[in-house]
Image (cartoon, rainbow, N blue to C red):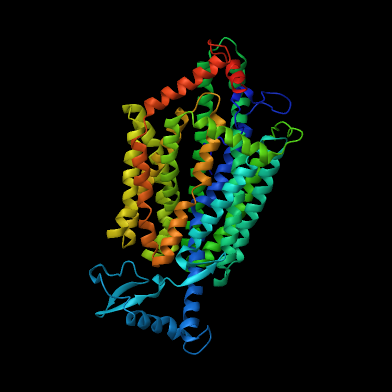
Amino acid sequence: MATNVNEEHLGRSLEELPGIDELHPPAKKREIRGWYAYDAAGASFFYGTIDLLSILVVDQAGVVAKTNWCDKEYNLTEGDPGFDECFEKFWAEDFENKGFCSGLKAFGESLGTYTECKAENGTWIADFDKEATLVRFMGFEVAHVAVYAQSVTIMLILQLITLLLFGSINDFGFYRKKNFVICNTIAGVGISVLFWGSSPEDYTFNCAMLIVIQVFLNFSGVAYNSWLPLLVRATPKVDEAIMDKSLSLDEKFLLKEKVFSNISTWGSVFGFVGGWVYLTFLFVLALATPLGNNDSLLTRVGSLCCGMFFLALSTFAAYRLYARPGPKVPEGKNVVTIGLKRIYGTVKLACKLPELLKFLGAFIIYSDGNATIGATVAVFASEELYMGTVDILIVLYEAIICYAVGAAVAIKLKNKFDLDPKKILLVNLFLIGLTPLYSIFALRNPLELYLIVPLYALNSGSLGAFSRSVFASMIPRGHEAEFFTLNQLTDKGTSFIGPLVVTTVATRTGSIRTSFVSLVAFFYVGALILMFFNQKKADAERKAFEDLELKRAGALAGSEESIIEAKEI
Protein backbone atom coordinates (compact mmCIF):
# COMPACT_ATOMS: atom_id res chain seq x y z
CA MET A 1 0.00 0.00 0.00
CA ALA A 2 1.13 3.54 -0.67
CA THR A 3 1.74 5.07 2.72
CA ASN A 4 3.30 8.30 1.59
CA VAL A 5 0.25 9.81 -0.08
CA ASN A 6 -2.07 12.11 1.84
CA GLU A 7 -5.40 11.63 0.05
CA GLU A 8 -7.94 13.21 2.34
CA HIS A 9 -9.01 16.57 3.73
CA LEU A 10 -9.13 18.32 0.38
CA GLY A 11 -8.52 22.00 0.83
CA ARG A 12 -7.66 21.73 4.54
CA SER A 13 -4.22 22.45 5.97
CA LEU A 14 -2.96 20.83 9.16
CA GLU A 15 -3.87 23.97 11.10
CA GLU A 16 -7.50 23.48 10.10
CA LEU A 17 -7.61 19.85 11.25
CA PRO A 18 -8.89 19.17 14.77
CA GLY A 19 -6.27 19.41 17.48
CA ILE A 20 -5.93 17.22 20.55
CA ASP A 21 -9.27 16.83 22.31
CA GLU A 22 -11.60 14.11 23.60
CA LEU A 23 -12.34 12.70 20.13
CA HIS A 24 -8.79 13.25 18.88
CA PRO A 25 -6.43 12.06 21.62
CA PRO A 26 -2.66 12.43 21.31
CA ALA A 27 -1.15 10.18 18.63
CA LYS A 28 1.08 7.82 20.58
CA LYS A 29 3.41 5.07 19.33
CA ARG A 30 0.72 2.46 19.98
CA GLU A 31 -1.65 4.01 17.45
CA ILE A 32 1.05 4.89 14.92
CA ARG A 33 2.34 1.31 14.96
CA GLY A 34 -1.20 0.17 14.24
CA TRP A 35 -1.12 2.44 11.19
CA TYR A 36 2.17 0.86 10.12
CA ALA A 37 0.69 -2.64 10.47
CA TYR A 38 -1.80 -2.03 7.68
CA ASP A 39 0.99 -1.30 5.22
CA ALA A 40 2.52 -4.70 6.02
CA ALA A 41 -0.92 -6.29 5.54
CA GLY A 42 -1.37 -4.78 2.09
CA ALA A 43 2.17 -5.69 1.07
CA SER A 44 1.42 -9.39 1.56
CA PHE A 45 -1.07 -9.12 -1.31
CA PHE A 46 0.56 -6.56 -3.59
CA TYR A 47 4.16 -7.84 -3.28
CA GLY A 48 3.76 -11.47 -4.31
CA THR A 49 0.27 -12.93 -4.07
CA ILE A 50 -1.19 -10.79 -6.85
CA ASP A 51 1.70 -11.72 -9.17
CA LEU A 52 1.18 -15.45 -8.70
CA LEU A 53 -2.59 -15.06 -9.10
CA SER A 54 -2.07 -13.21 -12.39
CA ILE A 55 -0.15 -16.24 -13.69
CA LEU A 56 -2.85 -18.61 -12.41
CA VAL A 57 -5.69 -16.89 -14.30
CA VAL A 58 -3.64 -16.66 -17.50
CA ASP A 59 -2.79 -20.38 -17.30
CA GLN A 60 -6.43 -21.25 -16.66
CA ALA A 61 -7.56 -19.13 -19.60
CA GLY A 62 -4.88 -20.83 -21.74
CA VAL A 63 -6.35 -24.26 -21.06
CA VAL A 64 -9.80 -22.98 -22.03
CA ALA A 65 -8.31 -21.41 -25.17
CA LYS A 66 -6.75 -24.74 -26.21
CA THR A 67 -9.98 -26.61 -25.53
CA ASN A 68 -11.96 -24.09 -27.59
CA TRP A 69 -9.51 -24.42 -30.49
CA CYS A 70 -9.80 -28.20 -30.66
CA ASP A 71 -13.57 -27.97 -30.42
CA LYS A 72 -13.75 -25.37 -33.18
CA GLU A 73 -11.27 -26.95 -35.60
CA TYR A 74 -11.92 -30.66 -35.05
CA ASN A 75 -15.14 -30.82 -33.04
CA LEU A 76 -13.22 -32.54 -30.23
CA THR A 77 -13.87 -32.00 -26.54
CA GLU A 78 -12.06 -33.30 -23.49
CA GLY A 79 -12.60 -37.06 -23.17
CA ASP A 80 -13.19 -37.63 -26.88
CA PRO A 81 -10.86 -40.01 -28.73
CA GLY A 82 -8.20 -37.91 -30.41
CA PHE A 83 -8.57 -34.93 -28.06
CA ASP A 84 -5.11 -35.42 -26.56
CA GLU A 85 -3.64 -35.84 -30.04
CA CYS A 86 -5.25 -32.56 -31.01
CA PHE A 87 -3.33 -30.85 -28.23
CA GLU A 88 -0.04 -32.51 -29.10
CA LYS A 89 -0.03 -32.62 -32.90
CA PHE A 90 -2.99 -31.28 -34.91
CA TRP A 91 -2.57 -27.64 -33.97
CA ALA A 92 1.13 -27.67 -34.89
CA GLU A 93 0.46 -29.11 -38.35
CA ASP A 94 -2.34 -26.62 -38.88
CA PHE A 95 -0.17 -23.63 -38.14
CA GLU A 96 2.68 -24.96 -40.26
CA ASN A 97 0.34 -25.46 -43.20
CA LYS A 98 -0.89 -21.89 -42.90
CA GLY A 99 2.65 -20.58 -42.98
CA PHE A 100 2.65 -19.11 -39.51
CA CYS A 101 5.97 -20.77 -38.76
CA SER A 102 7.97 -19.13 -41.54
CA GLY A 103 10.25 -16.10 -41.45
CA LEU A 104 12.81 -14.77 -38.98
CA LYS A 105 14.07 -18.28 -38.33
CA ALA A 106 17.40 -16.95 -37.16
CA PHE A 107 15.65 -15.50 -34.13
CA GLY A 108 13.72 -18.70 -33.42
CA GLU A 109 10.28 -17.13 -33.77
CA SER A 110 7.86 -15.35 -36.06
CA LEU A 111 7.32 -11.91 -34.60
CA GLY A 112 3.96 -10.36 -35.32
CA THR A 113 2.22 -13.68 -35.96
CA TYR A 114 0.02 -15.82 -33.77
CA THR A 115 2.67 -18.27 -32.68
CA GLU A 116 6.27 -18.69 -31.69
CA CYS A 117 8.26 -21.25 -33.66
CA LYS A 118 11.01 -23.51 -32.46
CA ALA A 119 13.57 -25.67 -34.26
CA GLU A 120 13.23 -29.41 -33.68
CA ASN A 121 15.16 -31.81 -35.89
CA GLY A 122 15.28 -29.17 -38.59
CA THR A 123 11.48 -28.70 -38.60
CA TRP A 124 9.74 -25.54 -37.48
CA ILE A 125 6.81 -26.29 -35.22
CA ALA A 126 4.27 -24.08 -33.49
CA ASP A 127 4.38 -23.64 -29.75
CA PHE A 128 0.78 -23.86 -28.58
CA ASP A 129 1.39 -21.83 -25.44
CA LYS A 130 1.93 -18.84 -27.73
CA GLU A 131 -1.17 -19.31 -29.85
CA ALA A 132 -3.44 -16.27 -29.72
CA THR A 133 -6.62 -18.25 -29.34
CA LEU A 134 -9.32 -15.96 -28.02
CA VAL A 135 -11.39 -16.50 -24.89
CA ARG A 136 -14.50 -14.69 -23.73
CA PHE A 137 -13.92 -12.36 -20.81
CA MET A 138 -16.29 -9.75 -19.39
CA GLY A 139 -18.14 -9.48 -22.70
CA PHE A 140 -14.96 -9.19 -24.80
CA GLU A 141 -12.86 -11.59 -26.81
CA VAL A 142 -9.25 -11.31 -25.73
CA ALA A 143 -6.10 -13.37 -26.01
CA HIS A 144 -5.76 -15.71 -23.05
CA VAL A 145 -2.41 -14.07 -22.18
CA ALA A 146 -4.23 -10.73 -21.79
CA VAL A 147 -7.10 -11.68 -19.45
CA TYR A 148 -5.32 -10.32 -16.37
CA ALA A 149 -4.33 -7.07 -18.12
CA GLN A 150 -7.98 -6.68 -19.17
CA SER A 151 -9.14 -7.19 -15.58
CA VAL A 152 -6.66 -4.53 -14.41
CA THR A 153 -8.11 -2.12 -16.98
CA ILE A 154 -11.65 -2.71 -15.71
CA MET A 155 -10.51 -2.45 -12.10
CA LEU A 156 -8.79 0.89 -12.64
CA ILE A 157 -11.79 2.39 -14.41
CA LEU A 158 -14.04 1.29 -11.53
CA GLN A 159 -11.49 2.69 -9.08
CA LEU A 160 -11.48 6.06 -10.83
CA ILE A 161 -15.28 6.24 -10.68
CA THR A 162 -15.23 5.22 -7.02
CA LEU A 163 -12.64 7.84 -6.09
CA LEU A 164 -14.49 10.59 -7.96
CA LEU A 165 -17.88 9.80 -6.44
CA PHE A 166 -17.03 8.64 -2.93
CA GLY A 167 -13.45 9.76 -2.26
CA SER A 168 -14.61 12.44 0.19
CA ILE A 169 -16.88 10.30 2.36
CA ASN A 170 -14.07 9.53 4.82
CA ASP A 171 -13.89 13.24 5.68
CA PHE A 172 -17.20 13.11 7.51
CA GLY A 173 -18.44 11.62 10.77
CA PHE A 174 -17.21 8.12 11.59
CA TYR A 175 -17.18 6.95 7.96
CA ARG A 176 -13.38 6.69 7.88
CA LYS A 177 -13.13 3.79 10.30
CA LYS A 178 -16.38 2.16 9.17
CA ASN A 179 -15.25 2.09 5.54
CA PHE A 180 -11.80 0.93 6.56
CA VAL A 181 -13.17 -2.09 8.41
CA ILE A 182 -15.83 -2.98 5.83
CA CYS A 183 -13.51 -2.71 2.81
CA ASN A 184 -10.74 -4.71 4.49
CA THR A 185 -13.15 -7.45 5.54
CA ILE A 186 -14.52 -7.84 2.00
CA ALA A 187 -11.01 -7.79 0.50
CA GLY A 188 -9.56 -10.27 3.00
CA VAL A 189 -12.42 -12.73 2.56
CA GLY A 190 -12.17 -12.34 -1.22
CA ILE A 191 -8.44 -13.13 -1.23
CA SER A 192 -9.13 -16.31 0.75
CA VAL A 193 -12.05 -17.32 -1.48
CA LEU A 194 -9.69 -17.48 -4.48
CA PHE A 195 -8.44 -20.78 -3.04
CA TRP A 196 -11.55 -22.47 -4.43
CA GLY A 197 -11.14 -21.18 -8.00
CA SER A 198 -9.26 -24.28 -9.13
CA SER A 199 -10.71 -25.37 -12.49
CA PRO A 200 -9.70 -23.77 -15.81
CA GLU A 201 -13.24 -22.44 -16.32
CA ASP A 202 -12.85 -20.45 -13.07
CA TYR A 203 -10.56 -17.89 -14.74
CA THR A 204 -13.49 -15.50 -15.21
CA PHE A 205 -14.56 -15.87 -11.56
CA ASN A 206 -11.00 -15.43 -10.33
CA CYS A 207 -10.47 -12.30 -12.43
CA ALA A 208 -13.80 -10.86 -11.25
CA MET A 209 -12.75 -11.51 -7.65
CA LEU A 210 -9.40 -9.80 -8.25
CA ILE A 211 -11.25 -6.76 -9.60
CA VAL A 212 -13.51 -6.61 -6.53
CA ILE A 213 -10.60 -7.19 -4.12
CA GLN A 214 -8.44 -4.43 -5.59
CA VAL A 215 -11.27 -1.88 -5.82
CA PHE A 216 -12.05 -2.39 -2.13
CA LEU A 217 -8.37 -2.43 -1.15
CA ASN A 218 -7.73 0.84 -2.95
CA PHE A 219 -10.78 2.48 -1.40
CA SER A 220 -9.61 1.20 1.98
CA GLY A 221 -6.28 2.84 1.15
CA VAL A 222 -8.05 6.19 0.84
CA ALA A 223 -9.37 5.80 4.39
CA TYR A 224 -6.00 4.52 5.58
CA ASN A 225 -4.01 7.42 4.15
CA SER A 226 -6.57 9.91 5.47
CA TRP A 227 -5.35 9.08 8.98
CA LEU A 228 -1.87 10.40 8.18
CA PRO A 229 -2.56 14.16 8.45
CA LEU A 230 -4.69 13.51 11.54
CA LEU A 231 -1.91 11.52 13.20
CA VAL A 232 0.61 14.24 12.36
CA ARG A 233 -1.71 16.94 13.72
CA ALA A 234 -2.34 14.93 16.93
CA THR A 235 1.36 14.37 17.56
CA PRO A 236 2.07 16.32 20.80
CA LYS A 237 5.16 17.94 19.30
CA VAL A 238 3.20 19.28 16.30
CA ASP A 239 0.20 20.30 18.41
CA GLU A 240 2.41 22.32 20.72
CA ALA A 241 4.19 23.96 17.79
CA ILE A 242 0.93 25.01 16.12
CA MET A 243 -0.30 26.59 19.36
CA ASP A 244 3.03 28.32 19.98
CA LYS A 245 2.68 31.92 18.75
CA SER A 246 6.41 32.55 19.14
CA LEU A 247 7.30 30.19 16.29
CA SER A 248 7.30 31.46 12.71
CA LEU A 249 5.20 29.87 9.99
CA ASP A 250 8.36 28.44 8.37
CA GLU A 251 9.49 26.83 11.63
CA LYS A 252 6.10 25.20 12.11
CA PHE A 253 5.99 24.04 8.51
CA LEU A 254 9.44 22.43 8.72
CA LEU A 255 8.50 20.59 11.92
CA LYS A 256 5.26 19.29 10.42
CA GLU A 257 7.08 18.13 7.28
CA LYS A 258 9.67 16.31 9.38
CA VAL A 259 7.01 14.44 11.38
CA PHE A 260 4.98 13.77 8.24
CA SER A 261 7.99 12.34 6.37
CA ASN A 262 9.09 10.29 9.38
CA ILE A 263 5.73 8.56 9.84
CA SER A 264 5.27 8.12 6.10
CA THR A 265 8.77 6.68 5.54
CA TRP A 266 8.46 4.18 8.39
CA GLY A 267 5.13 3.09 6.95
CA SER A 268 6.91 2.33 3.67
CA VAL A 269 9.57 0.37 5.56
CA PHE A 270 6.91 -1.75 7.25
CA GLY A 271 5.37 -2.34 3.83
CA PHE A 272 8.64 -3.64 2.39
CA VAL A 273 9.23 -5.79 5.46
CA GLY A 274 5.70 -7.21 5.24
CA GLY A 275 6.20 -8.06 1.58
CA TRP A 276 9.58 -9.65 2.28
CA VAL A 277 8.18 -11.76 5.14
CA TYR A 278 5.31 -13.04 3.04
CA LEU A 279 7.53 -13.86 0.07
CA THR A 280 9.74 -15.82 2.47
CA PHE A 281 6.66 -17.73 3.65
CA LEU A 282 5.81 -18.60 0.03
CA PHE A 283 9.39 -19.76 -0.53
CA VAL A 284 9.11 -22.11 2.45
CA LEU A 285 5.85 -23.51 1.09
CA ALA A 286 7.42 -24.06 -2.33
CA LEU A 287 10.72 -25.60 -1.19
CA ALA A 288 9.83 -27.45 2.00
CA THR A 289 6.38 -28.89 1.21
CA PRO A 290 4.82 -30.97 -1.61
CA LEU A 291 3.07 -27.78 -2.76
CA GLY A 292 6.24 -26.91 -4.68
CA ASN A 293 5.33 -29.59 -7.22
CA ASN A 294 1.96 -28.02 -8.03
CA ASP A 295 2.10 -24.34 -9.04
CA SER A 296 -1.67 -23.92 -9.13
CA LEU A 297 -2.20 -25.40 -5.67
CA LEU A 298 0.76 -23.43 -4.26
CA THR A 299 -0.72 -20.19 -5.56
CA ARG A 300 -4.19 -20.94 -4.20
CA VAL A 301 -2.90 -22.03 -0.77
CA GLY A 302 -0.75 -18.89 -0.71
CA SER A 303 -3.85 -16.82 -1.47
CA LEU A 304 -5.81 -18.50 1.32
CA CYS A 305 -3.01 -17.81 3.82
CA CYS A 306 -2.61 -14.25 2.50
CA GLY A 307 -6.31 -13.56 3.10
CA MET A 308 -6.04 -14.72 6.72
CA PHE A 309 -2.78 -12.79 7.23
CA PHE A 310 -4.35 -9.67 5.76
CA LEU A 311 -7.48 -9.95 7.90
CA ALA A 312 -5.40 -10.41 11.05
CA LEU A 313 -3.13 -7.39 10.47
CA SER A 314 -5.88 -5.09 9.14
CA THR A 315 -8.05 -5.95 12.16
CA PHE A 316 -5.10 -5.16 14.43
CA ALA A 317 -4.67 -1.82 12.63
CA ALA A 318 -8.37 -0.97 12.99
CA TYR A 319 -8.24 -1.85 16.69
CA ARG A 320 -5.24 0.41 17.32
CA LEU A 321 -6.42 3.40 15.24
CA TYR A 322 -8.80 5.89 16.87
CA ALA A 323 -11.84 6.81 14.77
CA ARG A 324 -10.88 10.52 14.78
CA PRO A 325 -14.25 11.57 13.32
CA GLY A 326 -14.77 14.47 10.97
CA PRO A 327 -17.65 16.96 10.81
CA LYS A 328 -21.17 15.94 9.86
CA VAL A 329 -22.23 16.15 6.23
CA PRO A 330 -23.64 19.69 5.72
CA GLU A 331 -27.41 19.77 5.70
CA GLY A 332 -28.86 19.64 2.19
CA LYS A 333 -25.62 18.32 0.65
CA ASN A 334 -24.22 14.88 -0.07
CA VAL A 335 -20.68 13.52 -0.15
CA VAL A 336 -20.77 12.90 -3.93
CA THR A 337 -21.40 16.54 -4.86
CA ILE A 338 -18.99 17.76 -2.18
CA GLY A 339 -16.23 15.48 -3.49
CA LEU A 340 -16.74 16.45 -7.14
CA LYS A 341 -16.80 20.14 -6.21
CA ARG A 342 -13.54 19.82 -4.28
CA ILE A 343 -11.82 17.98 -7.12
CA TYR A 344 -13.01 20.64 -9.58
CA GLY A 345 -11.65 23.31 -7.24
CA THR A 346 -8.27 21.57 -7.04
CA VAL A 347 -8.00 21.28 -10.83
CA LYS A 348 -8.95 24.94 -11.16
CA LEU A 349 -6.29 25.84 -8.61
CA ALA A 350 -3.67 23.68 -10.40
CA CYS A 351 -4.29 25.63 -13.61
CA LYS A 352 -2.68 28.61 -11.87
CA LEU A 353 0.55 26.63 -11.58
CA PRO A 354 1.57 25.74 -15.18
CA GLU A 355 4.84 24.01 -14.27
CA LEU A 356 3.06 21.77 -11.78
CA LEU A 357 0.59 20.78 -14.49
CA LYS A 358 3.47 20.07 -16.86
CA PHE A 359 5.07 17.75 -14.32
CA LEU A 360 1.73 16.09 -13.60
CA GLY A 361 1.26 15.44 -17.33
CA ALA A 362 4.61 13.64 -17.53
CA PHE A 363 3.88 11.76 -14.31
CA ILE A 364 0.52 10.46 -15.59
CA ILE A 365 2.23 8.91 -18.61
CA TYR A 366 5.35 7.36 -17.10
CA SER A 367 3.66 6.16 -13.90
CA ASP A 368 1.11 4.33 -16.06
CA GLY A 369 3.86 2.50 -17.92
CA ASN A 370 5.74 1.74 -14.72
CA ALA A 371 2.64 0.29 -13.02
CA THR A 372 1.84 -1.81 -16.09
CA ILE A 373 5.31 -3.38 -16.17
CA GLY A 374 4.93 -4.27 -12.50
CA ALA A 375 1.53 -5.86 -13.20
CA THR A 376 2.62 -7.90 -16.25
CA VAL A 377 6.22 -8.96 -15.58
CA ALA A 378 5.14 -12.17 -13.79
CA VAL A 379 2.93 -13.15 -16.74
CA PHE A 380 5.82 -12.37 -19.12
CA ALA A 381 8.14 -14.59 -17.08
CA SER A 382 5.66 -17.45 -17.11
CA GLU A 383 4.44 -17.24 -20.71
CA GLU A 384 7.59 -16.16 -22.53
CA LEU A 385 10.37 -17.67 -20.41
CA TYR A 386 8.50 -20.70 -19.00
CA MET A 387 9.61 -19.86 -15.47
CA GLY A 388 8.04 -21.79 -12.60
CA THR A 389 6.65 -20.38 -9.37
CA VAL A 390 9.90 -20.66 -7.42
CA ASP A 391 11.84 -18.89 -10.17
CA ILE A 392 9.26 -16.08 -10.27
CA LEU A 393 9.40 -15.75 -6.47
CA ILE A 394 13.15 -15.15 -6.82
CA VAL A 395 12.39 -12.36 -9.32
CA LEU A 396 9.89 -10.81 -6.88
CA TYR A 397 12.44 -11.07 -4.07
CA GLU A 398 14.96 -9.22 -6.20
CA ALA A 399 12.42 -6.56 -7.10
CA ILE A 400 11.26 -5.71 -3.58
CA ILE A 401 14.81 -5.49 -2.21
CA CYS A 402 16.11 -3.42 -5.12
CA TYR A 403 13.10 -1.11 -5.02
CA ALA A 404 13.77 -0.23 -1.37
CA VAL A 405 17.53 0.12 -1.95
CA GLY A 406 16.97 2.26 -5.05
CA ALA A 407 14.76 4.72 -3.17
CA ALA A 408 17.12 4.99 -0.17
CA VAL A 409 20.37 5.25 -2.13
CA ALA A 410 19.03 7.79 -4.61
CA ILE A 411 17.89 10.12 -1.83
CA LYS A 412 21.24 9.83 -0.03
CA LEU A 413 23.19 10.55 -3.23
CA LYS A 414 20.97 13.51 -4.00
CA ASN A 415 21.48 15.02 -0.52
CA LYS A 416 25.23 14.34 -0.49
CA PHE A 417 26.03 15.70 -3.96
CA ASP A 418 23.11 18.12 -4.31
CA LEU A 419 21.93 16.40 -7.52
CA ASP A 420 19.14 17.87 -9.63
CA PRO A 421 15.98 15.72 -9.05
CA LYS A 422 14.80 16.33 -12.61
CA LYS A 423 18.02 14.89 -14.03
CA ILE A 424 17.73 11.88 -11.74
CA LEU A 425 14.17 11.28 -12.96
CA LEU A 426 15.26 11.52 -16.60
CA VAL A 427 18.05 8.98 -16.01
CA ASN A 428 15.57 6.68 -14.22
CA LEU A 429 13.10 6.88 -17.12
CA PHE A 430 15.78 6.23 -19.73
CA LEU A 431 17.07 3.14 -17.90
CA ILE A 432 13.61 1.75 -17.09
CA GLY A 433 12.63 2.18 -20.74
CA LEU A 434 15.50 -0.13 -21.67
CA THR A 435 13.74 -3.02 -19.91
CA PRO A 436 10.89 -3.53 -22.41
CA LEU A 437 13.14 -2.33 -25.25
CA TYR A 438 15.65 -5.08 -24.43
CA SER A 439 12.92 -7.71 -24.75
CA ILE A 440 12.69 -7.02 -28.51
CA PHE A 441 16.20 -8.29 -29.17
CA ALA A 442 16.87 -10.57 -26.23
CA LEU A 443 15.40 -11.60 -22.88
CA ARG A 444 15.01 -15.22 -23.99
CA ASN A 445 15.99 -17.03 -20.78
CA PRO A 446 15.46 -16.66 -17.00
CA LEU A 447 19.07 -15.64 -16.33
CA GLU A 448 18.60 -12.49 -18.41
CA LEU A 449 15.50 -11.59 -16.41
CA TYR A 450 17.36 -12.09 -13.13
CA LEU A 451 20.00 -9.66 -14.38
CA ILE A 452 17.65 -7.01 -15.75
CA VAL A 453 15.19 -6.90 -12.83
CA PRO A 454 17.67 -5.03 -10.57
CA LEU A 455 18.11 -2.41 -13.31
CA TYR A 456 14.35 -1.90 -13.43
CA ALA A 457 13.66 -2.08 -9.67
CA LEU A 458 16.53 0.17 -8.54
CA ASN A 459 15.41 2.89 -10.94
CA SER A 460 11.74 2.33 -10.19
CA GLY A 461 12.38 2.85 -6.46
CA SER A 462 14.27 6.05 -7.19
CA LEU A 463 11.57 7.17 -9.64
CA GLY A 464 8.83 6.76 -7.03
CA ALA A 465 10.75 8.57 -4.29
CA PHE A 466 11.76 11.56 -6.42
CA SER A 467 8.42 11.88 -8.20
CA ARG A 468 6.72 12.44 -4.87
CA SER A 469 9.53 14.72 -3.65
CA VAL A 470 9.42 16.96 -6.72
CA PHE A 471 5.62 17.08 -6.72
CA ALA A 472 5.47 17.94 -3.00
CA SER A 473 7.96 20.80 -3.44
CA MET A 474 5.61 22.53 -5.89
CA ILE A 475 2.49 22.48 -3.70
CA PRO A 476 1.49 25.84 -2.17
CA ARG A 477 1.58 25.78 1.62
CA GLY A 478 -1.79 24.84 3.13
CA HIS A 479 -2.92 22.94 -0.01
CA GLU A 480 -0.97 19.72 0.53
CA ALA A 481 -3.95 17.43 1.02
CA GLU A 482 -5.96 18.48 -2.02
CA PHE A 483 -2.96 18.26 -4.36
CA PHE A 484 -1.98 14.81 -3.10
CA THR A 485 -5.55 13.73 -3.79
CA LEU A 486 -5.16 14.99 -7.35
CA ASN A 487 -1.88 13.08 -7.51
CA GLN A 488 -3.66 9.92 -6.35
CA LEU A 489 -6.39 10.31 -8.97
CA THR A 490 -3.87 10.74 -11.78
CA ASP A 491 -1.56 7.98 -10.54
CA LYS A 492 -4.10 5.27 -9.64
CA GLY A 493 -7.33 6.40 -11.24
CA THR A 494 -6.12 7.03 -14.80
CA SER A 495 -3.49 4.29 -15.09
CA PHE A 496 -5.77 1.98 -17.08
CA ILE A 497 -4.25 3.02 -20.42
CA GLY A 498 -1.15 0.83 -20.06
CA PRO A 499 -3.08 -2.39 -19.29
CA LEU A 500 -5.50 -1.52 -22.11
CA VAL A 501 -2.58 -1.22 -24.55
CA VAL A 502 -1.22 -4.58 -23.36
CA THR A 503 -4.65 -6.21 -23.83
CA THR A 504 -5.14 -4.76 -27.31
CA VAL A 505 -1.66 -5.59 -28.63
CA ALA A 506 -1.63 -9.08 -27.10
CA THR A 507 -5.07 -9.86 -28.57
CA ARG A 508 -4.06 -8.74 -32.05
CA THR A 509 -0.62 -10.34 -32.10
CA GLY A 510 -1.01 -13.22 -29.66
CA SER A 511 2.25 -12.24 -28.00
CA ILE A 512 2.69 -10.87 -24.49
CA ARG A 513 6.25 -9.98 -25.57
CA THR A 514 5.00 -7.63 -28.29
CA SER A 515 2.59 -5.94 -25.87
CA PHE A 516 5.41 -5.63 -23.33
CA VAL A 517 7.55 -3.82 -25.90
CA SER A 518 4.74 -1.33 -26.55
CA LEU A 519 5.27 0.10 -23.05
CA VAL A 520 8.56 1.74 -24.11
CA ALA A 521 6.63 4.75 -25.37
CA PHE A 522 5.23 5.54 -21.91
CA PHE A 523 8.68 6.15 -20.46
CA TYR A 524 10.22 8.10 -23.31
CA VAL A 525 7.15 10.25 -24.02
CA GLY A 526 6.95 10.98 -20.29
CA ALA A 527 10.65 11.86 -20.28
CA LEU A 528 10.19 14.14 -23.30
CA ILE A 529 7.48 16.13 -21.49
CA LEU A 530 9.58 16.21 -18.33
CA MET A 531 12.47 17.79 -20.25
CA PHE A 532 10.35 20.94 -20.68
CA PHE A 533 9.60 21.11 -16.95
CA ASN A 534 11.48 23.87 -15.07
CA GLN A 535 11.66 23.26 -11.33
CA LYS A 536 13.04 26.73 -10.52
CA LYS A 537 10.15 28.29 -12.37
CA ALA A 538 7.75 25.96 -10.55
CA ASP A 539 9.20 27.12 -7.22
CA ALA A 540 8.74 30.75 -8.26
CA GLU A 541 5.11 30.06 -9.24
CA ARG A 542 4.47 28.43 -5.87
CA LYS A 543 5.93 31.37 -3.95
CA ALA A 544 3.99 33.87 -6.04
CA PHE A 545 0.78 31.98 -5.36
CA GLU A 546 1.46 31.89 -1.60
CA ASP A 547 2.19 35.64 -1.60
CA LEU A 548 -1.05 36.30 -3.48
CA GLU A 549 -3.03 34.37 -0.86
CA LEU A 550 -1.40 36.41 1.90
CA LYS A 551 -2.17 39.67 0.13
CA ARG A 552 -5.77 38.70 -0.40
CA ALA A 553 -6.06 38.10 3.32
CA GLY A 554 -4.57 41.51 3.93
CA ALA A 555 -1.80 40.03 6.08
CA LEU A 556 1.59 40.56 4.47
CA ALA A 557 3.27 39.41 7.67
CA GLY A 558 2.28 35.86 6.82
CA SER A 559 0.52 34.54 9.92
CA GLU A 560 -1.03 31.07 9.86
CA GLU A 561 -4.51 32.54 10.12
CA SER A 562 -3.98 34.59 6.99
CA ILE A 563 -3.56 31.50 4.82
CA ILE A 564 -6.71 29.94 6.25
CA GLU A 565 -8.64 33.17 5.68
CA ALA A 566 -7.22 33.52 2.17
CA LYS A 567 -8.47 30.10 1.21
CA GLU A 568 -11.99 31.15 2.14
CA ILE A 569 -11.92 34.15 -0.20
- Horizontally, is 189 left or right of 260 in the view? right
Q: Residue at x 54, y 16 (%)?
A: 550
Quadrant in which the N terminus is drawn: top right
Total count of labels: 0
Q: Relative to 83, is 236 above or below?
A: above
Tell me where residue 552 sits by quadrant. top right
Q: Residue at x 36, y 39 (%)?
A: 529
* Residue 199 visible here: no
Instruction: Report the front residue among 233 and 483.
Output: 483
Question: Where residue 501 appears, x then y in whole percent?
Answer: 43, 56
Tell me where residue 212 sits by quadrant. bottom right
Question: Where residue 114 appears, x then y in whole percent?
Answer: 37, 71
Q: Residue at x 57, y 19 (%)?
A: 563
* Residue 203 visible here: yes
Q: Relative to 279, is 68 above or below?
A: below
Instruction: Report the front residue among 325 and 440.
Output: 440
Instruction: Report the front residue among 125 and 307.
Output: 125
Instruction: Report the front residue among 221 and 388.
Output: 221
Question: Where residue 487 appears, x then y in whole percent?
Answer: 51, 38
Quadrant in which the C terminus is drawn: top right
Q: Relative to 243, is 507 above or below?
A: below
Q: Residue at x 45, y 65 (%)?
A: 145
- Horizontally, is 121 left or right of 31 in the view? left
Question: Where residue 322 appears, x then y in whole percent?
Answer: 68, 34
